[in-house]
Image: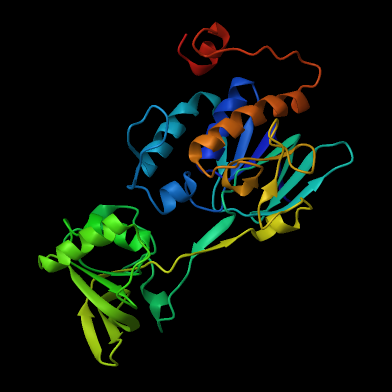
Amino acid sequence: MPQIIETDVVIVGAGPVGLFAVFELGLLDLKAHVIDILDRPGGQCAELYPEKPIYDIPGFPMVTGQGLVDNLMEQIKPFHPTFHFSRMVERLEKLEDGTFEVATDADELFKAKVVVIAAGGGSFQPKRPPVPGIEAYEGKSVYYAVRKMEAFRDQDVLIVGGGDSALDWTLNLQPIARSVTLLHRRDDFRAAPHSVGAMRELVAAGKLKLEIGQVTGLEGADGQITAAVVKRNDGATTSVAATRLLPFFGLTMKLGPIAGWGLNLNENLIPVDTARFETSTPGIFAIGDINTYPGKLKLILSGFHEGALMAQAAKRIVSPDQRIVFQYTTSSTNLQKKLGVN
């Protein structure tokens, strides 16, 4: 029998928008359980860009992706949310009484009055390059994201790709790595022009190596690479020393089971209204990058706004007979007590 968990709200997605939704719901005394396919909170901010600076979060001239996640986790502590990581929602069903059943692949069954989808672009995974035997090195010396820069200190790093991620990490890791080689299939890059310019300056100064070609094989043993076999565009084959390989071939974004939840979809996005951010199914809300509406901006700060309005609507569903009095955290002793500051 599955474990049955009853709560006010189930949030699918533990990225920044999902985390802030916990806060807004908590102010209204709504208990939330949060489900995420990743093994930690933060979504793409923590998985792909933990040390990348973000400049458009209100009140923070600059904050890293992980820094933002850490602050959000601190902010929601008073509400004691329960997290369920490394899980995928397999089934979402609305019952005759208007409540929802949410089943995960971890044999859990949630019962809630409200479901909030804050799943970003859905479940995502990096595209694996077509290199024979690369699986044996993944997680040991081949990585698809930089979670801790220290893991690359004093290493021979080979970065493969020509987009923003590849160029950003080439520039960020160059000062701490023993050597950095950037490999791309052509001498033309899709990244921001200033990043490409900075990269070429480092190459000209002899502080960075640039190779044009493709990885065709890896050398090494026991999960540790020592070199990559590179086929250049002129047909010649060379060996590039590397103890760390970072392939940036893009992400495969999949809605996964969300596509089968009976919601209206528009090009893999969920249309919502802009008063409640409710989907075509009453009681199911979508906030953040997963939703769409006229004028939508895919910004974290937009998702925060959506979460605040969603919470007000969710409260009316969970407690239909309770009068809602709008309060400000700056002046409400009631809210301050909930936050532990009064």
**Residue at left 80%, top 48%?**
93
Where is residue 113 drawn, in percent x and y? 76, 34
| Nearest to the observer: residue 130 or residue 85 | 130
**Residue at left 48%, top 44%?**
41
Residue extending farthest to the right is 96
Where is residue 60 drawn, in percent x and y? 36, 30
| Nearest to the observer: residue 128 or residue 106 | 128
Where is residue 128 drawn, in percent x and y? 45, 72
| Nearest to the observer: residue 156 or residue 120 | 120
Residue 218 lies left or right of residue 269; in this view the side is left
Residue 44 lies left or right of residue 155; in this view the side is right
Q: Above or below — where is 174 with respect to 342?
A: below
Residue 85 lies left or right of residue 293; in this view the side is left
Where is residue 291 drawn, in percent x and y? 64, 46
Q: Is residue 217 visible?
A: yes
Residue extending farthest to the left is 205
